[in-house]
Amino acid sequence: MTASPTDDTVGLVPPGPLPWSFEHATPNPIVDEPINRWLHRRLAYAVLVLCRPFAAYLSPNLLTVIGTLLGVASGAALVMGAQPGAAAQRTELTLIAAACLVLSVVFDCSDGMFARLTGKSSKLGMILDGASDTIVYTSVWVGLAVHLSAAAPMPWLWPIAVITALVSFTQIASFDQVKNRYQKAMAGEHDRVMAASVGSALPPSLSFMRPFVWIYDTLYPLSVRSMIGAPLHHNPGTEAVFAAVTHTMRAARWLGLGLHMALLYTFLVLLAFAPHAALPYLCGGVLAFTAPVMVTRWRWRRAIQISADAA
């Protein structure tokens, strides 16, 4: 029996404006992280409703830039809290960093939602959104490591921070690539081992963004290969393949950026009031994502085998 795409393929920005509603603004739940669906996107939709009278003057890229600036401000507040003369204000600066990060995540969700509602989508916007995620995530992690080195100096702090950040990055990359491959499989497209380069959509005027392109075209595929293996080489569109990749996508939803950001801003609140309990919480939280990674890996390899057997 051949599987039809149905609405499980939804997740990309459709052409043209849509009626304003939360359902129209958000992707299909199966490709959306639960915490984004039930928290971040609802806050983002509230922001968009407030901004609706000015929708003609807004663009998804502007919302992306606002989210990026808020994320950088979060990292900067953490660095400021690490300064020798800021010990008395460290708690307040940590809470400011947490608030800026929450707002950054909300605006990060709002750009794609606004693009869906207004039809203002572009390949450049996709690259900017990805670059924003990288900038914000790096800013917060660097600011956090500097902050912790002052608030709770420990010789093993930096190695743990680096390892935790790398594990977190790999899990986020796995979610992104499983989502992309799921959408291709459901749309009946052949998945050619990362054949399409993000760099092909980068205008010459934005050559300074090449480092972010390298992350998506090089680091992401390497991370994903190490975690979940190769993509589907065959896609006959059978019901078995449809079910296998759907189960994989459901497991991968617990690996994405939204959950890692929620882990970080919750960590910052905890750090402000209980600094000695914060680091074990962060390390334990990231390690807890290992179970979804293993489930995703097993289910994806099963989907590859089913796809190859059906070809």
Image (cartoon, rainbow, N blue to C red):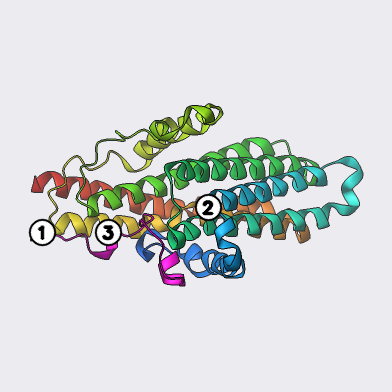
Q: Is residue 69 left or right of residue 181?
A: right
At x 10% / y 59%, what residue is drawn?
A: 2
Residue pointed to by mark 3: 246
Q: CA distance from mark 3 to mark 1?
A: 15 Å
Amino acid identity at mark 2: Pro
Spot occupied by residue 27 in the image (x, y as percentages of width and height): 40, 62
Q: Is residue 162 above or below residue 237?
A: above
Element on which disc 2 rests: helix
Whether residue 290 is in magenta: the answer is no
The answer to which quarter of the image holds residue 262 is: bottom right
At x 30% / y 39%, what residue is drawn?
A: 229
The answer to which quarter of the image holds residue 273 is: bottom right
At x 40% / y 66%, what residue is drawn?
A: 18
Residue pointed to by mark 1: 2
Spot occupied by residue 254 in the image (x, y as percentages of width and height): 44, 58
Which segment is the magenta one?
1-25
Whether residue 4 is in magenta: the answer is yes
At x 28% / y 52%, what residue is drawn?
A: 299
Label 1 or label 2, whichever lies nearer to me, is: 2
